[in-house]
Image (spheres, grey):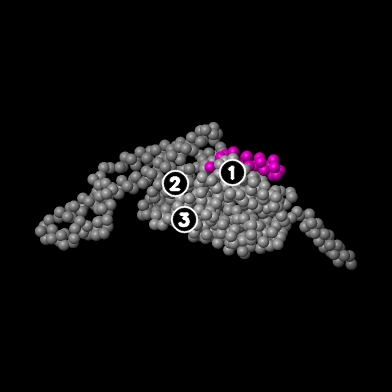
Amino acid sequence: MLKFPFLLLGLIVGVIIALDATLDAAPLRAGVAKVDITHPDHPTRPGDKLYAKALVLSDDTTTTVIISLDAVAVGGIGYIKNDYLPNVRAALEKELKIKPSNVLINASHCHGVVCQEKDMEERTVQAVQEAYKKLEPVKVGVGKGREDRIMENRRLKLKSGKEADVRHAYSLPADDEVVGVGPVDPEIGVLRIDRMDGTTLAVVYNFAVHPIQGVAGGENTADITGFASQVIEDNLSEGAVALFVQGCAGDINPALYKDVDKPRDAEPLGNMLGLSTLKAVRTIKTKEAAPLKHINEPLTLPRGELQPRIYAQEARQKELLGTLQGTSLNLKTFLALTAKYDLSPDFPSHYAHRYFQEQALGREDLRKLDANNRKNLEAYLKNVLVMEELTRVQENLRLLKLHQAQHVAAGKRTLDVELVGLRVGDFVLVTSPGELTCQIGLNIKKASPHANTFVAGYTNGYIYYAPTAEQLANVGGAQEDSDCLLAPEWQKLFEDRVAELLKKL
């Protein structure tokens, strides 16, 4: 007889608890702003500015700042110095009471020229201050887009089992030596933030590509991602800001990066990325009461042992030099003979009838000339291929020596970095200061317990390339495995810690 009243009472208590939890949950607020950071002495084309963009998120318990920079790196290399990050954080803590660990700064890795260091700090702080003043209740949603036309993996798999990469710093291996390429990640991770009236306040989008295409006139540029952000902003609500967060782009080049048949132009690639992002933005449904969580953790990684690899590359350099042989040809005669022998392989030195005339007379003067020329062509071409490999060896050897000197100067065998785990609603982001290669991001996404997990490199510092342990077995063959401070063991340490971080989110 009492069963029904007790069930009813339990239901009422449950509803009260749920309502109480809803009333206690602080609404998520957000503010966004952007400030021009273009260097005044390095002009851009009209509409192609470099920006510091700031998104402030707060639920009254946690306040988080996401800053995206049109810059090559946050310290380490380029125009932003190593004290930029701590100086910006200290200023924000002093003026806005924001915890330093809750400030996330990501560089797009474009190679544009930003303003002077002191100006950079002041303008970055200004962007955050302006965003903070605009805090308002918002709704958020997450989605995914796809873009696979604008990038390519720059690591080439060779018949020898080694790998080379596509760079302007050196020549590529011969086509018949290439047997494959590495992976790309076409996924665009999108966080959409709407005002309560449904208009869009901000879009955060994560994608992996080196924005190093440049523009035809050589002007200063925010490159692919700058153009993409402009397309997004132009097609959203008035005042909406698009913040690009660079992904695992360590081995991802723009498509046709070494094209010599038309001027370099990042704008078409950026337009495609922007439009593909907009497609995803328009499918996202936003909602209130999104959880906000920001975790910042230190991680100690092992430095690589580079001296043995330097010795190995020096030995290879010496070996290659020893194979160079004197030849009768120079570039002028090589090009002329190559054209003749490719155009008419059977009768390169004269018209066909002269060969038949000699044959009828029992002579082989032209055939002997051809045999000698082919021998000289082969010898000259062999020297060319050796020279091209030497350019790769020497450039990567330079990088190894640079980082060995940094190891010595550091005086320790480890490297201290910080990782960030950020959750905004169902949008989950983990970060690293390294130039993570594509496979690292693919691994993390596949293993994550969250459906919408995205990975960012180039964040809160800079530690050069962070390739996989497998790629590091190729040291000296490609930039990513030579322009690196880390030992192969770093990958497992990093991916294991990220897995723990994701569970906490």
The type of residue carrying mark 2 is Ala
Do the CB atoms of the residues marked 2 and 1 lie less than 8 Å apart? Answer: no
Q: Which mark is residue 265?
A: 3
Q: Which residue is mark 2?
A: 478
The type of residue carrying mark 3 is Asp
The quarter holding residue 317 reads: top left
Q: Who comes first in sequence, dot 2 or dot 1?
A: 1
Residue name at image x 26 percent, y 59 percent: 343
Q: Residues within 10 Å of mark 2 (few under 14, many from 20)?
A: many
Q: Which residues are magenta?
A: 79-100
Q: Is residue 379 visible?
A: no
Picture coordinates of residue 300, whole percent (x, y):
59, 40
Picture coordinates of residue 400, whole percent (x, y):
46, 39
Q: Who comes first in sequence, dot 1 or dot 3?
A: 1
Picture coordinates of residue 268, whole percent (x, y):
49, 59
Q: Is residue 350 visible?
A: yes
The quarter holding residue 230 reads: bottom right
Q: Which residue is mark 1?
A: 120
CA gap between label 2 and label 3 equals: 25 Å
Q: Quadrant of the N terminus?
A: bottom right
Residue name at image x 42 percent, y 53 percent: 258
Residue 288 falls inside the magenta stretch: no
Residue 94 falls inside the magenta stretch: yes
SS of the residue under disc 2: loop
Of badges 2 and 3, nearer the viewer stands 3
Residue name at image x 51 percent, y 36 percent: 406
